[in-house]
Image (tube, grey):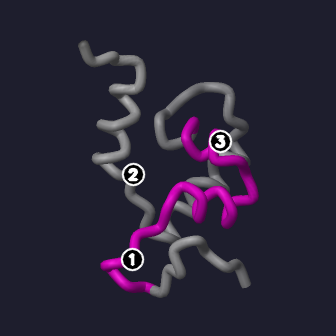
């Protein structure tokens, strides 16, 4: 049995993280990111494992995290 970072127990208020998906699929966080973002160079078998983990955990990327990540290179004046 896998111990999830979020203690995911079919509770809608507790959301699975990219760490949980990576652990369940047996891949790195970067690989999960590549699959979620549709980047090339991911083997079909690996993509299938990540997709299965995403489905099992009901993983949804965080919009707030995406917004923060998209502003990494911006400097305030």
Q: Mark 2 points at which residue?
A: 61
Nearer to us in this view, 28 or 50 = 28
Between the residue at mark 2 and the residue at mark 3, the CA separation in whole angstroms equals 14 Å
Between the residue at mark 1 and the residue at mark 3, the CA separation in whole angstroms equals 23 Å
Task: Answer with mark 1 or mark 3, whichever residue precedes in sequence.
Answer: 1
Q: Name the residue under label 3.
A: 31
Task: Kindly indicate whether the residue at mark 3 contacts the one at mark 2 (C-beta within 8 angstroms).
Answer: no
- In the picture, residue 13 is in which quadrant? bottom left
Q: Which of marks 1 and 3 is in front?
A: 1
Say which residue appears at 70% left-offset and 78% top-offset.
2
| Label 2, residues with CA under 10 Å away: few <14, some 14-19, many ≥20 | some
Task: Tell me where residue 25 appears, x and y as whole percent.
Answer: 68, 60
Nearer to us in this view, 53 or 14 = 14
Q: Name the residue under label 1.
A: 14
Which span is picked out in magenta?
10-34
Image-based side of 42 in relation to 67, left or right: right
Nearer to us in this view, 71 or 75 = 75
| Label 3, residues with CA under 10 Å away: few <14, some 14-19, many ≥20 | many
Image-based side of 31 in relation to 18, left or right: right
Task: Tell me where residue 76 appears, x and y as whole percent.
Answer: 27, 18
């Amino acid at each position: 049995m896998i111990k999830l970072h979020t203690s995911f127990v079919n509770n809608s208020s507790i959301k699975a993280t990219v760490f949980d998906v990576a652990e369940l699929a047996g891949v790195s966080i970067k690989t999960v990111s590549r699959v979620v973002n549709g980047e090339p160079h991911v083997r079909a078998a690996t993509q299938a494992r990540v997709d299965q983990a995403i489905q099992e955990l009901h993983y949804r990327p965080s919009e707030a995290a995406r917004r923060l990540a998209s502003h990494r290179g911006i400097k305030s004046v």
